[in-house]
Image (tube, rainbow, N blue to C red):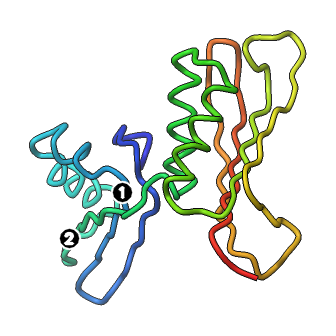
Amino acid sequence: MKTSSGVEGIARIEIQKRIDLIQIIIYMGFPKILIESRSRGIEELQMNLQKEFNYVNRKLNIAITRIEKPYGNPNILVEFIAGQLKNRVSFRKAMKKAIELTEQADTKGIQVQIAGRIDGKEIARVEWIREGRVPLQAIRAKIDYCSYTVRTIYGILGIKIWIFIEGE
């Protein structure tokens, strides 16, 4: 649904099915993008979903919820980095900016990894930056993870983000 609607900043989508009602809750970092970009954005989305799901006798309810700290969510952060890389910003600058934004969201640690033909070099490589603690081996640690592929003019890059929230 994200690619067809073209809306960025969606953290997650919850679908709750009941007998007579389907409730879709969209958690967004910046809900003004969906509401202000198109005057009938939500109604258009609702019509598309009703056609897609082919529900005639069920009511479809869409609710948009704002996330308090959007840059503490890896999905929104990875879309930010992907947008920077598409605009030919240096990968290291984009990663440092993402870490800076995450530190404002009160996280304990972040690790960002970019792999592929970085900056158009002939040989693909993997670059990563870690700030704070990211205990990937501890099972009890609460870590948000996201992987994302982005098409640049040089080729496809893979971005992975681990955000350590709390735990242990």
In the picture, measured across the screen, residue 135 lies left or right of residue 158, that is right
Please name the residue that numbered disc 2 is placed on. 56
- Total numbered labels: 2
Using the image, determine if residue 41 lies above or below residue 92: below
Front residue of 115 and 15: 115
In the picture, measured across the screen, residue 53 lies left or right of residue 128, that is left
Task: Indicate which disc, 2 or 1, sits on the residue closer to the N terminus.
Answer: 1
**Distance between the alpha carbons at the discs numbered 2 and 1:** 28 Å
Residue 20 image offset from top left, x and y in percent: 23, 86
Using the image, determine if residue 8 lies above or below residue 63: above
Residue type for callout 2: Val
Using the image, determine if residue 72 lies above or below residue 158: below
Front residue of 158 and 56: 158
Quarter where residue 53 is shown: bottom left
On residue 28, which mark appears?
Answer: 1
Front residue of 69 and 38: 69
Residue 35 image offset from top left, x and y in percent: 18, 48
Residue type for callout 1: Met
Residue 97 image offset from top left, x and y in percent: 57, 35
Residue ID at (26%, 69%): 55
Residue ID at (37%, 64%): 68
On residue 147, which mark appears?
Answer: none
